[in-house]
Amino acid sequence: QVQLVESGGGLVQAGGSLRLSCAASARIFSANVMAWYRQAPGKQRELVATLTSGGITNYADSVKGRFTISRDRDNAKNTVYLQMNSLKPEDTGVYYCRMTVIPSNADYWGQGTQVTVSS
């Protein structure tokens, strides 16, 4: 069982930056996809960004050019990051980390970290 722990959330003014971290309790050697989701109050959880173990990234249109998903360089820390720049009030929500292991489709979620962007 893999545990994911997010950190780095907080309160920031519009235009500011935050970096979220997602630390996995174990290193996964199988192909996997790491993802960040967010959920705003009263809204459904939405996909923000994905990163495959092969290094392919994808972003929601609303965050392209502002957010960057990455892993630590040698993956020794089993950590994935979400660098968020030029934050907007509509980026407010709880941000969740997710790991999907391929081909078993084992699926893990973190507990979430709150991001609040004030106008």
Image (cartoon, rainbow, N blue to C red):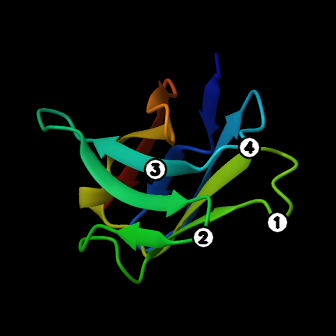
Instruction: Name which residue type carries label 3.
Output: Ala
Instruction: Name which residue type carries label 2.
Output: Gly
> As drawn, is 24 to the left or to the right of 54?
right
Nearest to viewer (mark 2 / mark 3): 2
Disc number placed over residue 73 in the picture, else none: 1
Q: Which mark sits nearer the N-terminus, 1 or 4?
A: 4
Q: Which mark sits nearer the N-terminus, 3 or 1?
A: 3
> As drawn, is 4 to the left or to the right of 59?
right
- Label 2 to label 3: alpha-carbon separation: 12 Å
Residue 54 sits above or below residue 45 on the image: below
> As drawn, is 55 to the left or to the right of 66?
right
- Label 1 to label 4: alpha-carbon separation: 15 Å
Q: Residue furthest top?
A: 1
Disc number placed over residue 29 in the picture, else none: 4
- Label 3 to label 1: alpha-carbon separation: 17 Å
- Label 4 to label 2: alpha-carbon separation: 14 Å
Report helix, strand or loop for mark 1: loop
- Label 4 to label 3: alpha-carbon separation: 17 Å
Q: Residue at x 11, y 32 (%)?
A: 42
Instruction: Name which residue type carries label 1.
Output: Arg
Q: Which mark sits nearer the N-terminus, 4 or 3?
A: 4
Residue occupied by mark 3: 35
Instruction: Name which residue type carries label 4.
Output: Phe
> As drawn, is 9 to the left or to the right of 92?
right
Residue occupied by mark 2: 55
Residue 14 sits above or below residue 44 on the image: below
Report helix, strand or loop for mark 3: strand
Disc number placed over residue 64 in the picture, else none: none
Q: Residue at x 51, y 42 (%)?
A: 102
Crowding around mark 4 (Cα neighbors within 10 Å: few <14, some 14 to 19, many 20+) is: few
Q: Quadrant of residue 82?
A: bottom right
